[in-house]
């Protein structure tokens, strides 16, 4: 029998090599195609949302010069922002490698995401076959994982790579741990060393990796086939290094960040509200796994304050159902009970709203937990298939047709969902259509309108944000910058000063206020703002450019050139600094040096319009 819900079954079934008739190679090919093909249209997508900052404006990933900073600071430290819980060394290191190969081309980063998704699917296949001793179940569980539409955010969004990295390393670590099984509990130390090394890769990808030692402990004492034949010391020898490695990661993280999670995202959220919100989130996550229809990139968080909240009630019912199913499965097949444990345990870290951020509920957080869900659903599906096969042949045919139709629907949903990440305008408008009160998305939509030269719509979006969040520093600064472009310097100064007051650590507000002061001829005040920004965000080249303009106004050409060159050293991958230096050389009568800087800007960004225009002007003058 392939896999059943037999009472008391806890040991692996006999090897299924004989009954799993299709060759392994065929299954592998099908899984690779099903994991990759639905996501091929993501290769046409651009950098979207956080991608622009994390890739295009991130000096950390543009050369190996900042390798130390990648592993010792938060993922947003290059912007100069304050405390952050977002510690993602593997994400930034992966971007660094991609940038060296693909430069500023988005397709390469999307290609890596698709390749990682394929790797995860194959890792799930391997682990499932190890735990359940059935290639047939491994195939169907992996196929379900490959085609589940809830995974689109993790694969289609470049910045979703953190969950891909976490999951591939997490599943491989657990696979190495399961491989440690030996008669009498003997362990292979080389496998343990590899297990710990891969675990560190998972931990440096995302904090959810810290659930792995506990999961291994539960598996060792409650699920592993030889648990009754091994001593406690033999069991401990299999997973002790995972606990030591996890403790080492926590120590390093606390030392680097000054706390495990230094930033409380919702300071006004009480403990009881945190618990109630977590219960509500469990219901939301379980529902999204079963019914991935209304997918959205930004779910606005509304805290739960009472037991009477329908979301808390729904989450409570989901939790009770979970416990009842866990007890029932534990009596029939411990491996399936373990699948339930995997589902909830890997989800627990994202149920604390204070740790997660504004976007508390996110589909990408289900990427790793859904491994357990796929084990359960595939097992239930095979059980039903066996039941259908024992009855009328027509039932089996109908069942197969139903599964085929469902697979086609999943593929279509993935393909259409991928288009949401085609470009910023598409992403923001579709997200706001689903979540109109997602004010952070509205801020970014205003920026897209501004880039298009649509000042009216940009102003409208930012004013909408300020109606509900009057102290939003980004919207205030963006409006101030917009008014500055319209030469409304008094209004620009007002909004930018409000932005600085709202968030004194927001470097961009200081920079833009400095440029307004510069336009007004207040060079001393402008210099003060630029220097403040440079102190907060020493890698933000706009601060150097602003200060260079101050010295240009004062007639100090040497200091101006020095600051532009310093900006190039700080961020050699930013085409803006080469264009700015090229403009400086044009103004100081050095056309050949200007040409060199324009060309360097175009090497980094071949579609850089200002550099193209500057080079065209130089060519026309040289004729």
Image: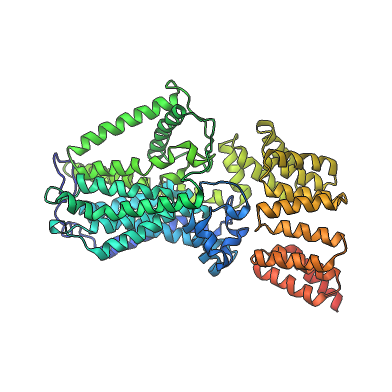
Instruction: Give the residue drawn at x 31%, y 60%.
Output: 195
Whether residue 344 is visible, yes or no, is yes
Occupied quadrant, residue 133: bottom left
From the top left corner, tell me how far across and down residue 110 is, in percent.
51, 59
> Is residue 579 among what the camera can see?
no
Quarter of the picture containing the C terminus is bottom right
Q: Position of residue 457 (x, y in %)?
A: 73, 41
| Residue 415 position in % (x across, y down) | 48, 51
Point out the residue furthest to the top here.
308
Q: Residue at x 35, y 27 (%)?
A: 317
Q: Residue at x 58, y 53 (%)?
A: 77
Residue 437, compared with residue 549, is above or below; it is above
**Residue that appears at 22% across and 59% down:** 180
Left-right relation of 601 to 331: right
In the drawing, does residue 339 fall left or right of residue 76? left
Q: Nearer the viewer, residue 555 or 104?
A: 555
């Amino acid at each position: 029998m392939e896999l059943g819900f037999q009472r008391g079954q806890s040991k692996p079934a006999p090897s299924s090599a004989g009954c799993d008739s299709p060759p392994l190679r065929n299954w592998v090919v099908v899984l690779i195609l099903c994991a990759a093909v639905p996501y091929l249209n993501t290769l046409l997508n651009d950098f979207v949302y956080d991608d622009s900052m994390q890739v295009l404006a991130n000096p950390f990933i543009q050369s190996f010069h900042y390798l130390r900073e990648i592993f010792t600071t938060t993922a947003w430290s290059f912007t100069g922002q304050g405390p952050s819980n977002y510690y993602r060394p593997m994400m930034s290191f992966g971007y660094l490698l991609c940038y060296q190969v693909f430069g500023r081309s988005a397709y390469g980063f999307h290609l890596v995401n698709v390749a990682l998704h394929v790797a995860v699917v194959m890792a799930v296949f391997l682990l499932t076959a190890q735990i359940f001793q059935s290639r047939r179940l491994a195939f169907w569980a992996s196929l379900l994982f490959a085609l589940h539409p809830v995974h689109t955010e993790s694969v289609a969004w470049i910045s979703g790579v953190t969950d891909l990295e976490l999951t591939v390393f997490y599943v491989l670590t657990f696979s190495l741990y399961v491989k440690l099984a030996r008669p009498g509990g003997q362990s292979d130390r080389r496998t343990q060393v590899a297990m710990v090394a891969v675990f560190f890769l998972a931990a440096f990808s995302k904090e959810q990796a810290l659930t792995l030692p506990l999961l291994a402990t539960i598996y060792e004492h409650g699920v592993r086939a030889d648990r009754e034949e091994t001593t406690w010391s033999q069991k401990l020898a299999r997973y002790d290094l995972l606990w030591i490695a996890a403790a080492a990661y926590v120590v390093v993280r606390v030392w680097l960040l000054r706390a495990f999670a230094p930033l409380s995202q919702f300071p006004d959220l009480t403990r009881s509200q945190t618990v109630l919100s977590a219960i509500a989130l469990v219901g939301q996550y379980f529902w999204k796994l079963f019914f991935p229809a209304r997918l959205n990139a930004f779910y606005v968080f509304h805290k739960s304050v009472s037991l009477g909240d329908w979301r808390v009630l729904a989450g409570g019912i989901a939790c009770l159902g979970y416990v009842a199913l866990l007890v029932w499965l534990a009596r029939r097949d411990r491996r399936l009970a373990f699948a339930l444990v995997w589902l909830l345990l890997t989800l627990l870290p994202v149920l604390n709203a204070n740790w997660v951020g504004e976007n508390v509920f996110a589909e990408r957080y289900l990427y790793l937990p859904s491994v357990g869900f796929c084990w359960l659903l595939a097992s239930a599906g095979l059980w039903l298939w066996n039941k259908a096969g024992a009855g009328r042949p027509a039932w089996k045919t109908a069942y197969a047709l139903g599964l085929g139709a469902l697979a086609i629907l999943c593929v279509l949903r993935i393909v259409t969902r991928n288009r949401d990440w085609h470009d910023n305008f598409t992403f923001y408008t579709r997200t706001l259509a689903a979540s109109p009160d997602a004010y952070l998305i509205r801020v970014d939509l205003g920026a897209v309108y501004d880039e298009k030269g649509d000042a009216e719509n940009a102003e409208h979006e930012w004013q909408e944000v300020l109606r509900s969040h009057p102290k939003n520093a980004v919207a205030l600064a963006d409006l101030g910058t917009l008014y500055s472009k319209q030469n409304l310097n008094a209004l620009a100064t007002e909004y930018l000063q409000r932005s600085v007051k709202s968030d004194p650590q927001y470097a961009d507000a200081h920079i833009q206020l400095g440029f307004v002061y510069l336009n007004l001829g207040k060079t001393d005040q402008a210099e003060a703002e630029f220097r403040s920004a440079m102190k907060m965000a020493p890698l933000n080249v706009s601060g150097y450019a602003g200060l260079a303009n101050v010295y240009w106004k004062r007639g100090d050409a040497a200091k101006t050139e020095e600051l532009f060159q310093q900006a190039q050293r700080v961020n050699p991958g930013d085409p803006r600094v080469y264009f700015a230096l090229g403009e400086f050389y044009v103004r100081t009568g050095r056309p050949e040096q200007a040409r060199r800087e324009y060309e360097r800007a175009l090497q980094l960004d071949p579609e850089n319009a200002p550099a193209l225009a500057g080079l065209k002007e130089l060519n026309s003058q040289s004729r």
